[in-house]
Image (cartoon, rainbow, N blue to C red):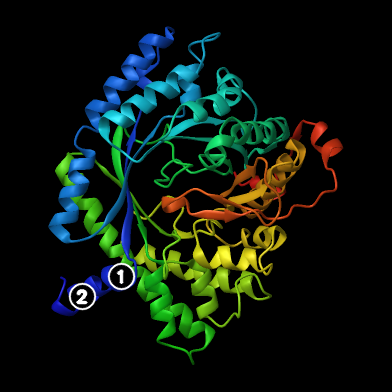
Amino acid sequence: MLNTFDILETIRMIQDECLDIRTITMGISLLDCIDPDMDKACRKVYDKITHKAENLVKTGEQIEKEYGIPIVNKRISVTPAAMLAAACPGQSPVKLALALQKAADTCGVNFLGGYSALVHKGFSAGDQALIESIPEALSLTNNVCASVNVGSTRSGINMDAVALMGKVVLDAAKATADRQCIGSAKLVVFCNAVEDNPFMAGAFHGVGEPDCEIHVGVSGPGVVRAAIEKYPGSSIDELADVIKKTAFKITRMGQLVGARASEMLHLPFGIVDLSLAPTPAVGDSVAHILEGMGLECCGTHGTTAALALLNDAVKKGGVMASSNVGGLSGAFIPVSEDAGMIDAARNGTLCLEKLEAMTAVCSVGLDMIVVPGDVTAETISAIIADEAAIGMVNNKTTAVRLIPAIGKKEGDTLEFGGLLGSGPVMPVNRKSPAKFIARGGRIPAPMHSIKN
């Protein structure tokens, strides 16, 4: 039961510490929309999404008023679109992207994820056509997000897909160069992608999920930072306990909202994803949490250890607050979306190599990182391969969301606005990995993948 102190504490977290429900995401299966006629499939997709999500935005707004809790985004995730494209050989998958955008517009959601393909062990029907269409699809849509899973601990890394994705990321940036290269900001390359992730741009509705369900993503970096600052003299293990207790409180709010949304929409409650997803707003930064632990600046020596502590404590606290914790749940480190990360990148303390080390212990990976516009596709592919290797070997989800800043160089800035923030162009290693990437094939799964 909530007492007066709990209620007042939550109000303070919302008003002063940037606590929010980052997203209510409705996952919708499109498997029953598959049709060999692409136009018919698109009509089925539009009809199903607009029927299922008809009241999603209205419900979110009603819960906001009912509980006084800000719900920043209302989103939809769908079955990987490559599965629908497989039934329509020779027909452009871009039509599906346009149907998804039309449905997003009708429902009034902020983002719709699932223009996706799962190719960690190889390409099946529809996969390659959809992947090659991603730059055009993202340039013609505003709210549609794409993702491709190129590796897993069980299967290894599909290096042919990695090579292709380097070109796709670069082409997506070029296709939207007049819009701050936003196409690449809506594209994620995964290793060990999860099926119930409510966060964009990597959300999709996995085939193991029910026909339709509700996920909630909670975010509260400011709350954790404020809690840490109350214990300046605490030991590391005492600090971990503070973070766990704080994560418990944050997740409990997500559980409340998720259960209410499930009840109002008459849908199963999927998961609560407790991810410390930052924003450019002052006081809502994961980097500032790490600095609150005692680091002079995020990116200095000790950053990876501090992030490991934070990520582990968040997961442990969240798991105790809800039986439905899932998704990614932990700490995100997107550079352009985090005021502290932006400052650290601009002053040179935070570099790409340090970010890569940090991804071994965070929730996702190299996220919202702006690189020079003259970067080669092979270099992008090599960065993806490195990150996928960290995920594969450590049996965790890793991802890459790079934005080549076409026409810009190191020290320049891309301005995305909103939650996506702004990103300083970070330097990349200029030595070529082209011969390695050109080999193709598959990096075998690690020995510890054999568990049966």
Element under label 1?
helix
Which residue bears the numbered disc 2?
A: 6
Element under label 2?
helix
Dot 2 or dot 1, earlier in sequence: 2
Which quarter of the figure has residue 33?
Answer: top left
Q: Residue furthest bottom?
A: 233
Graded by Cα atoms within 10 Å as few (under 14), some (14 to 19) or many (20 or more), the crowding at tag 1 reads some
Q: Are marks 2 and 1 in contact (CB under 8 Å)?
A: yes
Graded by Cα atoms within 10 Å as few (under 14), some (14 to 19) or many (20 or more), the crowding at tag 2 reads few
The amino acid type found where label 1 is placed reads: Lys
Which quarter of the figure has residue 268?
Answer: top left
Residue 85 point in image, percent of width and height: 49, 17
The amino acid type found where label 2 is placed reads: Asp
Which residue bears the numbered disc 1?
A: 249
**Relative side of 11 to 284, left or right:** left
The alpha-carbon separation of the residues under discs 2 and 1 comes to 9 Å
**Relative side of 132 to 438, left or right:** left
Residue 270 point in image, percent of width and height: 31, 45
**Relative side of 113 to 369, left or right:** left
Residue at 24% x, 71% y: name it: 10
Residue 151 drawn above or below residue 139: below
Residue 340 seen in the current view: yes
Residue 257 point in image, percent of width and height: 23, 55
Residue at 52% x, 38% y: name it: 179
Q: Which mark, residue 393?
A: none
